[in-house]
């Protein structure tokens, strides 16, 4: 299926090197390009808190809109590269799960919320006439 790749929007919080931002965009584009569903939007937020008290100062949030469904992942790690790797792996799993859920619903036919109505004959619909 040939489709235009979705543009990755990037938001940076804190001191994030350009190399880390480029790595995140490339990694997310790779994951998104492998899904057969139409990706409408992708937003990546990279955060780095330069506080030595934080064990995991690097955080990555990814939100993607795929086929009308929103997918959101978050990962925190000691380095931005580790956080990007973890978040992109989670994104790949969620996109796969989303695809599988769609397939299983199509196989079963009607959506789960559909109610099957049955009708039973109520009787003769002609007016009864009083014999007397």
Image (cartoon, rainbow, N blue to C red):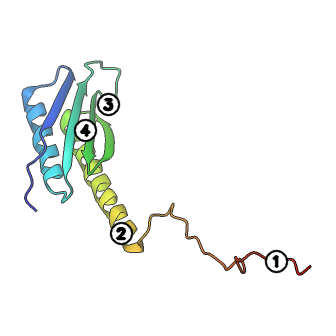
Mark 3 or mark 4: whose residue is earlier in sequence: 3
Total residue callouts: 4
Could you give the CA–CA distance between mark 2 and mark 1, rounded to whole angstroms?
A: 52 Å
Mark 1 or mark 4: whose residue is earlier in sequence: 4
State the SS at label 3.
Answer: loop
| Label 2 with label 4: CB-CB less than 8 Å | no
Residue under numbered circle 2: 106
Query: 127 or 106: nearer the eye?
Result: 127
Mark 2 or mark 4: whose residue is earlier in sequence: 4
Could you give the CA–CA distance between mark 2 and mark 3, rounded to whole angstroms?
A: 41 Å
Query: 107 or 57: nearer the eye?
Result: 107
State the SS at label 4.
Answer: helix
Q: Nearer the viewer, mark 1 or mark 4?
A: 1
Q: Is residue 16 above or below residue 76?
A: above
Q: Nearer the viewer, mark 2 or mark 3?
A: 2
Q: Is residue 101 left or right of residue 34?
A: right
Mark 2, other Cα within 10 Å: few <14 / some 14–19 / many ≥20: few
Residue under numbered circle 4: 83
Mark 2 or mark 3: whose residue is earlier in sequence: 3
| Label 3 with label 4: CB-CB less than 8 Å | yes
Q: Residue at x 30, y 55 (%)?
A: 93
Mark 2 or mark 1: whose residue is earlier in sequence: 2
Q: Which disc, if any, is residue 56?
A: 3
Residue extending farthest front: 132
Residue under numbered circle 1: 129
Q: Is residue 123 left or right of residue 131?
A: left
């Amino acid at each position: 299926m040939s489709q235009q790749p979705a543009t990755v929007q990037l938001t940076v919080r804190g001191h994030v090197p350009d190399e880390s931002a480029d790595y995140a965009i490339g990694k997310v584009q790779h994951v998104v390009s492998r899904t057969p569903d139409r990706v409408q939007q992708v937003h990546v937020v990279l955060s780095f808190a330069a506080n030595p008290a934080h064990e995991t100062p690097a955080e990555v949030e990814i939100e993607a809109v795929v086929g009308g469904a929103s997918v959101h992942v978050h990962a925190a790690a000691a380095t931005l590269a580790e956080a990007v790797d973890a978040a992109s792996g989670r994104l790949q799993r969620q996109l796969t799960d989303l695809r599988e859920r769609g397939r299983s619903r199509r196989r079963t036919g009607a959506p789960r919320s559909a109610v099957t109505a049955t009708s039973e004959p109520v009787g003769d619909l002609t007016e009864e006439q009083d014999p007397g």
